[in-house]
């Protein structure tokens, strides 16, 4: 199982340093001066942008890894389909092989049955009879026998020669048997070819099976890396979101301070107008009482609309 640190090292990911993050306390927000808050807003904005860039890079690498995972899964699926296709061919050749072997067995059974009918399978073979005749003739030529023993020996030789002649006659008349044996051997040979195809195709199917297993294993490894990369993306994105939220809070606080300053200025202007009005009324009262007004007094009266 791959770890987050291994993924960072393998893909040359810039680690997120918490020390670079910008904090915002409630005290900072409520009691900080406007200048301090403007500075803090800039810090939050810059760090947010850095984290968004970091999150974007990690998301891109995560997407690349997910794409590679899909490629490996597709590759594994191709091997699976090829394996299944070959296994179908294996089964077809197996069925044909078994069918031919059964046919060959039937033909060989017929051969044995025909041999039995011709008695070729019983008694001694031609070669055995030849060897026995040769042994008896050699004995006749090399041993000194009395008349009775030599007569018996000659009878044995004649008997075996008769059997040999009969055996040869039967063998010479076995064209049907030869054809049957040839057919049986041809069918068996054809079955062997199908068996060879079974072996070849089964080996290829096993290769595709092994490649499928390997591709799935690689897909799992890459998927693990993609999952860790997604965690790294979430880590950076959540930090970026926190900085954005704090940036928005500071901006809201600055607008509140601007509004408060504007209200204070408005109150000051209203208070000043009230004072000017009161002063102008005093001047106007003096004017009505016949006092001489200077230029400044006249301007104050004009400003307030009393003149």
Image: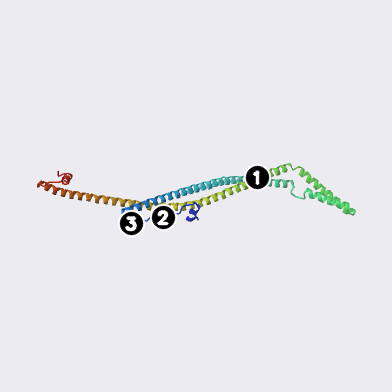
Residue 46 in view, yes or no: yes
**Residue topped by disc 2:** 20
Q: How crowded is mark 1: few (under 14 residues within 10 Å), some or many (20 or more)?
A: some
Q: Is residue 43 left or right of residue 168?
A: left
Element assignment for label 1: helix
Q: Report crowding for label 3: few under 14, some 14 to 19, many 20 or more residues within 10 A (C-alpha).
A: some
Give whichever of 207, 59 is nearer the camera.
59
Residue 192 in the figure: left or right of residue 281: right
Q: Which residue is drawn at 72% across and 43% down?
A: 178
Distance of label 3 from label 1 (alpha carbons): 88 Å
Describe residue 285's horizontal placement relative to residue 46 as left or right. Answer: left
Residue 153 image offset from top left, x and y in percent: 86, 52
Estimate the spatial distance between the alpha carbons at disc 2 and disc 1, rounded to whole Å.
74 Å
Dot 1 corresponds to which residue? 193
Q: Residue at x 36, y 51 (%)?
A: 42
Question: Mark 2 near mark 3, Cβ–Cβ under 8 Å?
Answer: no
Which residue corresponds to mark 3?
28
């Amino acid at each position: 199982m791959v770890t987050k640190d291994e993924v960072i090292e393998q893909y040359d990911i810039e680690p997120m340093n918490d020390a670079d993050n910008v904090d915002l306390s409630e005290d900072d927000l409520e009691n900080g001066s406007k200048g301090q808050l403007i500075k803090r807003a800039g810090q939050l904005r810059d760090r947010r942008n850095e984290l968004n860039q970091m999150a974007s890079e990690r998301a891109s690498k995560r997407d690349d890894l997910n794409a590679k995972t899909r490629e490996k899964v597709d590759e594994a699926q191709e091997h699976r389909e090829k394996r299944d296709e070959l296994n179908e061919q294996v089964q077809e050749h197996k069925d044909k092989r078994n069918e031919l072997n059964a046919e060959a067995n039937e033909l060989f059974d017929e051969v044995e049955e025909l041999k039995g009918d011709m008695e070729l399978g019983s008694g001694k073979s031609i070669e055995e009879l030849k060897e026995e005749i040769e042994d008896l003739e050699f004995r006749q030529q090399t041993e000194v026998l009395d008349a009775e023993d030599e007569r018996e020996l000659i009878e044995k030789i004649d008997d075996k020669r008769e059997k040999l002649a009969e055996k040869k006659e039967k063998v010479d008349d076995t064209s049907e048997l030869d054809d049957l044996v040839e057919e049986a051997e041809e069918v068996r040979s054809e079955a062997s070819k199908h068996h060879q195809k079974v072996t070849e195709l089964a080996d290829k199917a096993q290769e595709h099976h092994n490649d499928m297993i390997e591709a799935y294993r690689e897909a799992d490894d890459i998927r693990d890396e993609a999952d860790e990369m997604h965690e790294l993306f979430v880590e950076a994105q959540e930090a970026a979101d926190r900085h954005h939220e704090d940036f928005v809070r500071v901006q809201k606080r600055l607008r509140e301070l601007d509004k408060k300053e504007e209200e204070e200025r408005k109150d000051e202007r209203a208070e000043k107008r009230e004072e000017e009005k009161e002063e102008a009324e005093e001047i106007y009262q003096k004017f009505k009482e016949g006092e001489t007004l200077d230029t400044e007094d006249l301007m104050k009266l004009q400003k307030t609309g009393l003149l």
